[in-house]
Image: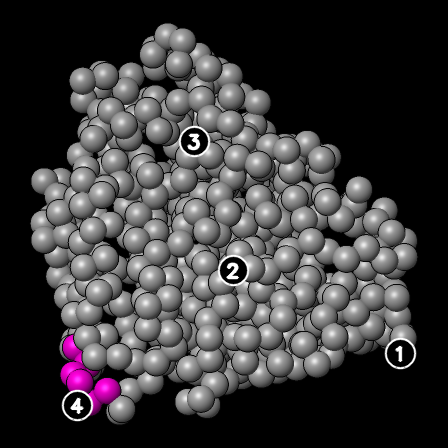
Amino acid sequence: LHCALNMETVEMNSISLKRPHSEDDVANADEIKRQKFSEKSKMGNDSGQSIETVTEQPDKPLLEVTKNEIIPNEESEEQEDEELEDSDEDGDPESFADMMKHGLTESDVGITKFVSSHKGFSGILKERYSDFVVHEIGKDGRVSHLDDFSVPVDDEDPSEETFTVLSEDDKQRLEELQLLKNKETSVAIEVIEDTKEKRTVIHQAVKSLFPGLETKTEDRDGKKYIIAYHAAGKKALANPRKHSWPKSRGSYCHFVLYKENKDTMDAINVLSKFLRVKPNIFSYMGTKDKRAITVQEIAVLRITAQRLAHLNKCLMNFKLGNFSYKNHPLKLGELQGNHFTVVLRNITGTDAQIEQAMHSLREIGFINYYGMQRFGTTAVPTYQIGRAILQNNWNEVMDLILKPRPGAEKGYLVKCREEWAKTKDPAAALKKLPVKRCVEGQLLRGLLKYGMKNIISAFGIIPRNNRLMYIHSYQSYVWNNMVSKRIEEYGLRAVPGDLTLKGATAVHIEEGDVDNYTIHDVVMPLPGFDVIYPKHKIGEAYKEMLVADNLDINNMRHRIRDYSLSGAYRKIIIRPQNVSWEVVAYDDPKIPLFTTDLDKLEGKPLPVLPTDGKFRALKMEFSLPPSTYATMAIREVLKMDTSIKNQTQLNTTWLR
């Protein structure tokens, strides 16, 4: 292994990325044309990008930046925002490729090196979102699977009739009362076929389906009515009634969420709407990709497994199961990582190339670069905005977010930017935006509220995680560039002056000690006020890079505390665990090449594959720790640029 590690690193730009033409290619072109190129702005979280998937950031929830910097989780937004987002049509491949010419490539963000010596080959990732499956690995090392729909038996659960006793009209009126949407202070429900049992079921139904409402029975004109009213004003909605929950039962219902083609926050927002609760009563260990099938654990406060199981009847693209009650929520980052099952279709590599590539991935690993998702997809990368924040250059921050930019964007955003460039009038620019929850809309609202002289407060309207995403993106940009420089300079071995972790503390590797370490022990810092730097040339390179960006590496504290960077350490090479692979032949690009948890629960048979199909696919599995990008592992196997810009141009070149 040691001699393998000292092999020469391969420059990315020496790889030819053009796909070879063949009769099979042409025969398959019609099928490939149907690929959704604009969705492949996330061929990889939710969890979606151009083969981009991320395993969570424990300390920094990574919010995906899609083509128009949409934020998936603004609780208060209107339904039409969602409809507008969902109705966005996929453009035809040629025009999307032309638009993406302005996007980033890997070398723009410092991703330039490979560790293996095999010859690269091409393949399509996420031709179908079901070609990318992510199973969360919990802190106990257990892989999450959906394999049980049964509900824990509980004498306290209401009867099944609870879910059917209220009419749709009753439910509508109760929801409006619960959410204080009108001036009514109570809702009266007439009890038809009055019996004590029937009244009990209605009482139970109102209280369990509409947390925060209380009920009482009243006689009116000789008829019995159940009157629903607010128990404790607005606070009741956030805190489902404590007294209705049995003491013996854990306060949190934990369950496995299986989802297809939806990111985690979107899924939670949908569950919240159906359950009529606020999204903040849900907790999870990490967000997962959109353009994938993902399986993860979720916890929710004081919602019964019975109510959750009922959602399986009415939800598309989700399934909930493996229910249990526990006394604790889940915490972001409390996971060991994720297990990936990935299919790369239409591969061109020989069996020998594939064997060499996969052995290298298993034995050596891949460079732990931050993937393209980290940097946005438009002509204005997120790291540039992060750099302007750190420089305290607020006019530049405003300008970068709002100015017109070339490339792939929705029409209304283009109009909004043009209006801003012309008038610098936030109100006029806002009028062009039907969707107000994007970063641009939030900043314009802030400028309207605080005025053009107070950009800091205006920018502060954007949710904190999204603001921090920009500066974390800059840190990632510096880290990627420095790691490429480190590997260029010293290759794949530990050298004196490198950093390694002893517990949580970074220490320098000394000359006499260097033989005790390999490249797998080496870490490099994300710049900040609480880290140390390598003692060799790369330590100086960090300083030089920051000086060129008008930043002082010795003063990473910002006058606004939120934007002070403490820094962190990150391993430069990751060796995936549990690596396995096989090459399969297939004829039909639509046929799934493995069975999912849901297929198994529904008893679907394994797909029958031909022994000598027209196409070949590489099916691979591997586990990664948190905060590492599956796409960077796949990049090492294929030796291909994973940026949307490159993927789109490759695919469209291939079609011509």
Please identify, in this view, whether the residue under mark 2 or under mark 1 is nearer the observer.
2
Residue at mark 4: 512
**Are dots 2 and 3 in contact, CB under 8 Å?**
no
For the residue pair 489 and 346, the one nearer the viewer reads as: 489
Q: Which mark is residue 12?
A: 2
Across the whole image, how many numbered discs are drawn on residues? 4
- Quadrant of the rendered image containing residue 530: bottom left
Q: Residues within 10 Å of mark 4 (few under 14, many from 20)?
A: few
N-terminal of the pair, mark 3 or mark 4, is 3
Q: In this image, 534 relative to 139: left or right?
A: left
Residue 389 lies in the magenta stretch = no
Residue bounds of the magenta highlight = 508-514
Percent of width and height locating residue 344: 68, 65
**Quarter occupied by residue 559:** top left
> Mark 3 to mark 4: distance in Å?
56 Å
Name which residue lies at 16% across and 83% down. 510
Q: Is residue 18 visible?
A: yes
- Badge 4 marks a residue whose secondary structure is helix
Judging by the rendered image, the residue that carries numbered circle 1 is 611
The residue nearer to you, when weighing 72 against 149, is 72
